[in-house]
Image (tube, rainbow, N blue to C red):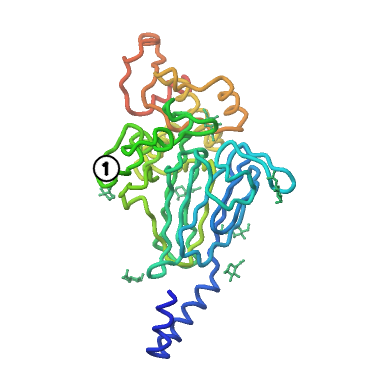
Amino acid sequence: MITEMAAASTSSNLHSLSFLLLLLVALSEATMLNITNRCSYTVWPAALPIGGGVQLNPGKTWALNVSGLTSRGRLWARTGCSFDSRGNGSCQTGDCGGVLACKGHGRPPNTMAEFIIGQFNSTDFFDMSFVDGFNVPMDFLPVPAQGRTGCSKGPSCAANVTSQCPSELKAPGGCNNACTVFKQDRYCCTGNAAYNCVPTKYSMFFNQMCPDVYVDSMDTDWNKTFTCPLGTNYQIVFCPQINLTTSPGTGSSSSKGRIGLILDLIDKNSDDMQAHEQDAIQMMKLAMWCLQIDCKRRPKMSEVVMVLEGTMYAESNIDHNFVATNQATFGIPGSVTSSVPPLASHVSGPR
Ligand SMILES: *[C@@H]1O[C@H](CO)[C@@H](O)[C@H](O)[C@H]1NC(C)=O
Ligand SMILES: *[C@@H]1O[C@H](CO)[C@@H](O)[C@H](O)[C@H]1NC(C)=O
Ligand SMILES: *[C@@H]1O[C@H](CO)[C@@H](O)[C@H](O)[C@H]1NC(C)=O
Ligand SMILES: *[C@@H]1O[C@H](CO)[C@@H](O)[C@H](O)[C@H]1NC(C)=O
Ligand SMILES: *[C@@H]1O[C@H](CO)[C@@H](O)[C@H](O)[C@H]1NC(C)=O
Ligand SMILES: *[C@@H]1O[C@H](CO)[C@@H](O)[C@H](O)[C@H]1NC(C)=O
Ligand SMILES: *[C@@H]1O[C@H](CO)[C@@H](O)[C@H](O)[C@H]1NC(C)=O
């Protein structure tokens, strides 16, 4: 950048003028990164090299100005923290040397967002990564500046990876990357595995849970890096609600499309059902969750209570393989091989 500027000013005044104009445009348009906590619990987001870290209570937003961040920035979630009035303390996940305002990276596991603002041809690059594992569901979406179109997509990981985490990778408050746990080349894509890193059952697990998110540092799926023009603002949401109105097949992950199918179960002729659509969907999702053939994937009673109280969303990442509820097949796992949602009568009773 600096050499470009020097070259411009010596070769031609016109060039330096247009460069100055570009610089002014870039400066006047602050790039805002808003971080919103939709979890039922407090999260302590941390950001480098701009931001440090704050406490973010449920429902609150942290607005961060990341203008001109041409080197790689990162933002991650911390949970289970306690800090004294001077900002000293610790976190269960994502801790950065025991301080509220981070100066160094977070301890795994933590879900991480990465971004570069206005680099190469005035483009922003952004992605999400499981390189340090997972602790909080998150999505990272662009909010295009007014009157601009062309970039509306970003990585999303609404699934609760912790609840499905293989036991070897489980950590208090999250799910570790296999590299963190085993420190072996084949999981870290280092050494002999650096340029031919083959998928492992662990990288496949993370990919299946959240296909938009990088799993290891050698992951070369460019589809996971998103771009937007400089001037775009961004929104990071912890515990995003899955967009229930997305129609089947349009979601980036199959779970979104399947949830669209649930909408078809809502009685179009019932005003009451229409008026309480979201509640009805939550109840059907809860029913489907409770009817999982794999009993290990069914909710705990405490989770059922939380969904009923509205303090937690029903798990969306479920097997579409349900215990049949009609008399003839009741209690015979395996007799149902359906890959579509259950019949309306199975989850909402006879009408
Ligand atoms: C954002 O940061 C840029 C560069 O540091 C600054 O020029 C701008 O005034 C800031 N904008 C806001 C809204 O804080
Ligand atoms: C970010 O948050 C600030 C302050 O709450 C708000 O003024 C702004 O509109 C938000 N920006 C986006 C892109 O959501
Ligand atoms: C707590 O914070 C203060 C001021 O930031 C610092 O000087 C001190 O070393 C910290 N104490 C501990 C135990 O980390
Ligand atoms: C730079 O951006 C412009 C406008 O978006 C585009 O037309 C052009 O192809 C880009 N150039 C390169 C080298 O990517
Ligand atoms: C995810 O699952 C874990 C373990 O089942 C649970 O403790 C945690 O509260 C869940 N998080 C969310 C956001 O639902
Ligand atoms: C990237 O996306 C395109 C179009 O959706 C697809 O054809 C391609 O296989 C994807 N690449 C990888 C590496 O997944
Ligand atoms: C959900 O998705 C639909 C269709 O893609 C879109 O029109 C709607 O604005 C989205 N709703 C939310 C809350 O994101």
Can you give x and y, in whole percent of width and height, for residue 279 in the image? 55, 33
Seen in the picture, residue 69 relative to 17 is either above or below; the reply is above
* Quadrant in the rendering for residue 98: top right
Q: Nearer the viewer, residue 312 or 223?
A: 223
Q: Position of residue 291 (x, y in %)?
A: 44, 20
Residue at label 1? 192
Residue ID at (55%, 73%): 28
In the rendered view, tell whether residue 90 sits above or below residue 22.
Answer: above
- Please indicate, yes or no, whether residue 342 appears anywhere in the rendered image: yes
124 in relation to 324, above or below: below
Location of the N terminus (image quadrant): bottom left
Q: Position of residue 300 (x, y in %)?
A: 53, 21
Identify which residue, 247 or 289, lies in the foreground.
289
Residue under the image location 56 percent in, 35 percent down: 276
Question: What percent of the width, then of the height, locates residue 138?
Answer: 50, 44
Q: Residue at x 36, y 23 (%)?
A: 321
**Secondary structure of residue under mark 1:** helix
Residue flagged by tag 1: what amino acid is it? Asn
Look at the numbered disc 1 and say if its residue's Cβ is closer than 8 Å to ligand 6: no
Residue 351 visible here: no
Mark 1 closeness class: few <14, some 14–19, many ≥20 residues within 10 Å: few
- Quadrant in the rendering for residue 34: bottom right
